[in-house]
């Protein structure tokens, strides 16, 4: 080939490149979450990335750390683009610098109950991805023939179980989400119509019942989450109280030995767990970025789809927020899934406003003093005082 001809080829190549600029590569987005069934989130995002040629990277954070990590990241302007968070975090939307999502992004197929979890101050601060997050009673069929329906029934079986080196029931005793189920059992609530309501007769009753389960040795009060789960999986605990988030893993680990039952009554009082949703939120800076916002919009649409909602349920037994998907899984549930759904219908939706976050902190600090031996009535008053003080600080301009 002559030099002259080579020159013309090079010139044409340059002209072609200038007239057809290379398409800019879509930015990589980062998603933080603390969902125990992290493999489900990984699978969903992998499908999203593959289907739309997107680039979303997932980082899993310990459940006990994610709130603090997000608040610190917001202060340091180091938030991820996206965060999958429990719905009670919504009350901290200012502190976490969440962006409100446009109303047109929400599918008409979403359940109205799921929308309530993300709506605050006339804005929607995230997209519901799955709902439930409620507590259930699991039992080992090798140790239990007929599950208890009332807490007081444990008195008769505890001595024999302890002789075998088996704990009657295991759960993270110090975790206030579990304690809240006792509070609701007696008709109380940490937050009532936006007001923090910790100093109540129901709180006193709940604290006294909680002290009883420890003094009767139905539970090990020093047990944490990982220990409770390990004891149950290893056959060292007859019962386990855990959430729907652990349902699928327990089915895989326990097989035919796993039983699922409704939470037991306290005497004549039915037990009510709280429930919530996991919500996909977006940081303000990411929503303001013209390259990132289309990817965020696409992901929000993707997680609402009926096929993706059913995929999430079949992968991790996490309840759909899409009405058609929810109806489909409700038609022919297995006996275990039937209990999962029934316990959800008996649960109490958790408020999403800022008062809920403050109530959790006050309950946790008050419970530390309760363990030291102060009365239930004094503990309830102390919790309320702490909460009121913190609430005033948050609301003061």
Image (cartoon, rainbow, N blue to C red):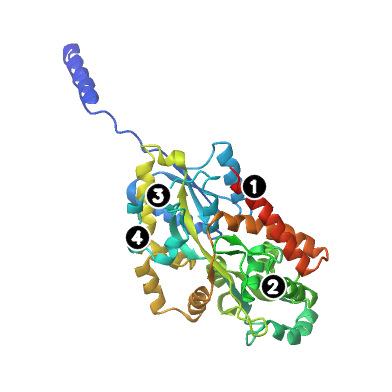
The total number of labels drawn is 4
Callout 3 environment at 10 Å: few (<14), some (14 to 19), or many (20+)?
some
Callout 2 environment at 10 Å: few (<14), some (14 to 19), or many (20+)?
some
Q: Badges 2 and 1: C-beta atoms under 8 Å apart?
A: no
Is 85 above or below relative to 144?
above
State the image coordinates of residue 65 (x, y, percent, origin top left): 63, 51
Mark in the foreground, 3 or 1: 1
**Disc 2 element:** helix
Q: Is residue 1 visible?
A: no
The residue indicated by pointer 4 is: 305
Which mark is first along the chain, 3 or 4? 3
Mark in the foreground, 3 or 2: 2
**Residue nearer the viewer, 106 or 59:** 106
Callout 1 environment at 10 Å: few (<14), some (14 to 19), or many (20+)?
few
State the image coordinates of residue 379 (x, y, percent, origin top left): 76, 64
Q: Badges 4 and 3: C-beta atoms under 8 Å apart?
A: no
Q: Is residue 322 left or right of residue 4?
A: right
Which mark is first along the chain, 1 or 3? 3
Which mark is first along the chain, 2 or 4? 2
Label at residue 201: 2
Label at residue 393: 1
Q: On the rendered image, what quadrant is the N terminus found in?
A: top left
Q: Is residue 122 left or right of residue 186?
A: left
């Amino acid at each position: 080939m002559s030099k002259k001809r080579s020159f013309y080829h090079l010139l044409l190549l340059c002209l072609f490149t200038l007239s057809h600029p290379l398409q800019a590569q879509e930015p990589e987005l980062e998603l933080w979450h603390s969902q125990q069934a992290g493999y489900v989130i990984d699978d969903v995002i992998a499908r999203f990335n593959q289907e739309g040629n997107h680039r979303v990277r997932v980082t899993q954070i310990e459940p006990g750390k994610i709130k603090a990590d997000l608040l610190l990241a917001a202060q340091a302007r180091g938030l991820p683009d996206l965060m999958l968070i429990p719905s009670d975090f919504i009350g901290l939307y200012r502190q976490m610098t969440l962006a409100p999502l446009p109303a047109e992004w929400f599918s008409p197929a979403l359940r109205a109950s799921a929308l309530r979890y993300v709506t605050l101050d006339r804005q929607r601060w995230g997209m519901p991805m799955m709902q439930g997050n409620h507590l259930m009673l699991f039992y080992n069929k090798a140790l239990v023939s007929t599950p208890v329906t009332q807490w007081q029934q444990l008195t008769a079986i505890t001595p024999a179980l302890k002789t075998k080196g088996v704990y009657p029931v295991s759960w993270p005793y110090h975790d206030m989400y579990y304690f809240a189920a006792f509070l609701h059992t007696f008709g109380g609530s940490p937050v009532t119509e936006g007001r923090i309501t910790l100093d109540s007769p129901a709180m006193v009753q709940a604290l006294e019942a909680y002290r009883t389960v420890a003094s009767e040795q139905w539970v090990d009060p020093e047990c944490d989450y990982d220990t409770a789960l390990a004891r149950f999986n290893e056959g060292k605990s007859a019962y386990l109280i855990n959430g729907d988030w652990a349902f699928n893993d327990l089915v895989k680990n326990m097989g035919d030995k796993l039983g699922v039952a409704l939470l037991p009554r306290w005497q004549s009082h039915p037990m009510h767990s709280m429930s919530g949703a996991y919500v996909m939120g977006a940081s303000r800076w990411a929503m303001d970025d013209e390259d990132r916002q289309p990817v965020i919009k696409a992901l929000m649409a993707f997680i609402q789809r009926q096929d993706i909602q059913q995929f999430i349920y079949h992968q991790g037994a996490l309840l759909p927020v899409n009405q058609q998907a929810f109806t489909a899984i409700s038609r022919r549930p297995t006996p275990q899934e039937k209990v999962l759904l029934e316990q959800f219908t008996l649960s109490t939706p958790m408020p999403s406003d800022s008062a809920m976050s403050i109530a959790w902190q006050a309950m946790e600090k008050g419970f530390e003093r309760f363990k030291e031996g102060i009365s239930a009535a004094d503990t309830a008053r102390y919790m309320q005082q702490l909460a009121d003080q913190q609430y005033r600080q948050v609301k003061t301009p």
